[in-house]
Image (spheres, helix red, strand yellow):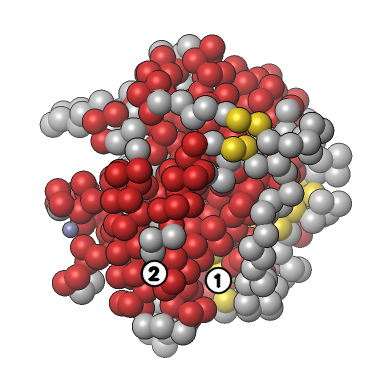
Amino acid sequence: MGSEPGLRLVHSRDPADVNELVSKVARGDSAAFEGLYDALGPAVFGVARRVIRDPNRAEDVAQDVFLEVWRKAPSFDDARGSAKTWIMTIAHRRAVDAVRRNESQKKYDGQAMPEEVQHDEPVERVIQQEEHGAVRTCLETLTELQMESVRLAYFNGYTYAEVATLLDKPLPTIKTRMRDGLIRLRDCLETAR
Amino acid sequence: MSTDVHTLSGAYALNALGPEEAAEFRRHLDGCQACREEVRELQTAVARMGAAEAVAPPPDLKARILAAADRTRQEPPAGPVTAGTSEPTPIRSAGTSSTAAGEHGRPRWVTWLAAAAATLVVAGGGAYGVQAMLDDEPPLSLAATRVFEAQDAHTATVETTEGGQLTVAVSAGRKEMAVDTRELPALDENHVYQVWSVHGDEMVSAAILSDPEIGAAMGMPDEETQVALTVEPAGGSEQPTTEPIVQVDPYEVLRS
Ligand SMILES: [Zn+2]
């Protein structure tokens, strides 16, 4: 993948800028679409890469995400949430769809359990953002069970029922840990701004 | 669903609900302002967690995405729905019953498939890729395009019981198949098409077409496995709830 070693410092765009870009994309502005890719391409690819692991399939998913954004931008309404959240939600949903589809295929082939999860960093160099530090700090405020529940669902694409099975906990416990964990994350990120 | 449905907001924001529960929670959101606000806030936090995973994409991805957007039509704004606004023609599911399970728990689609086994119409192709390039239609997903454009791809076009057509491509070399769903009847926003692999009594979800405009690709099923398409509630179902509107034997396509 990338040939230059080391980290690159990328200033994350102000969410308002991303909203502005999407409203231009809605009018068919391809320069704005390129700007949007520059702003969120690494985040979209990164989350797809982390969930799917296979870089080629992650590329396909990233492409599908941006095409969906391109096609649906005219209907985007920032009163219902920021454009960045909209795009990252699409990215995660599509990444999860890709692994679950693969999973039902595997189950069908007679392999019942998902393959063992690795937690190591992706091979590609990480793009260092301001975001990274705040998120890491805030994730540390979660309890261990909250953290595990959130992590298994988000990064491994498991349903909360699968998370409950993996962690051997009752469904309602996992459900509330996920919510409580995200509420902590939200509150911490708000103050860390 | 239980009375503590509100606490599903966290799992929902993490995309961690099964398809049925997600659809049900979405219906709950329509009527629950508190949950809508909470979901929006939690999704914002989740989006930042995801963005912290940013890695440099391969350099050529940008050019591919820009080129694909360049040949893709944007959808008109949805706009507020008011009485009298024309909506896409909703199609009813093919079945009259709301469940596909028969009296003895044996899914009714088994008999349905046996009865309908002759519906495959091979319109055969090979020039599919060229046509897709020349058309003004939105492109299929990259994964589906690769199957359609494979050197050894066999394609077939099948009519559905609800009108419209499904085009299937099968590549023995890639061990993959893909469906082009752009010619299927439009569904209302509460329904999706779902693809199933059907083997004996077992019916396993192969793809939920949350976006029929881009089709879907999937691994080649085992021999004696059919592929069926049903209309399901938004978010898809664990098991089919309606009868298939079309079914295809990929190996028959391969032999065409
Ligand atoms: Zn509620």
- Name the quadrant of the N terminus of chain A: top right
Residue A168 position in % (x across, y down): 46, 84
CA distance for labels 2 and 1 = 39 Å
Badge 2 element = loop
Against A65, residue A147 (above or below) is: below
Residue B128 or A15: which is nearer the viewer?
A: A15
Give the numbered dot on residue B102.
none
Subunit of label 1: B
Residue B212 or B198: which is nearer the viewer?
A: B212
Residue sitting at 56 percent across and 45 percent down? B53
Residue type at the position of mark 2: Thr
Query: Which residue is the site of mark 2?
Result: A143
Q: Quadrant of ligand 1?
A: bottom left
Residue sitting at 44 percent across and 60 percent down? A140
Residue B230 or A10: which is nearer the viewer?
A: A10
Give the numbered dot on residue B203.
1
Disc 2 packing (10 Å; few <14; some 14–19; many ≥20): some
Badge 1 element = strand
Disc 1 packing (10 Å; few <14; some 14–19; many ≥20): many
**Is there one chain holding both mark 2 and mark 1?**
no
- Name the quadrant of the C terminus of chain A: top left
Residue B166 position in % (x across, y down): 58, 44
Residue A2 visible here: yes
Residue B213 visible here: no
Residue sitting at 69 percent across and 51 percent down? A122
**Total count of labels:** 2
Residue A130 position in % (x across, y down): 49, 36
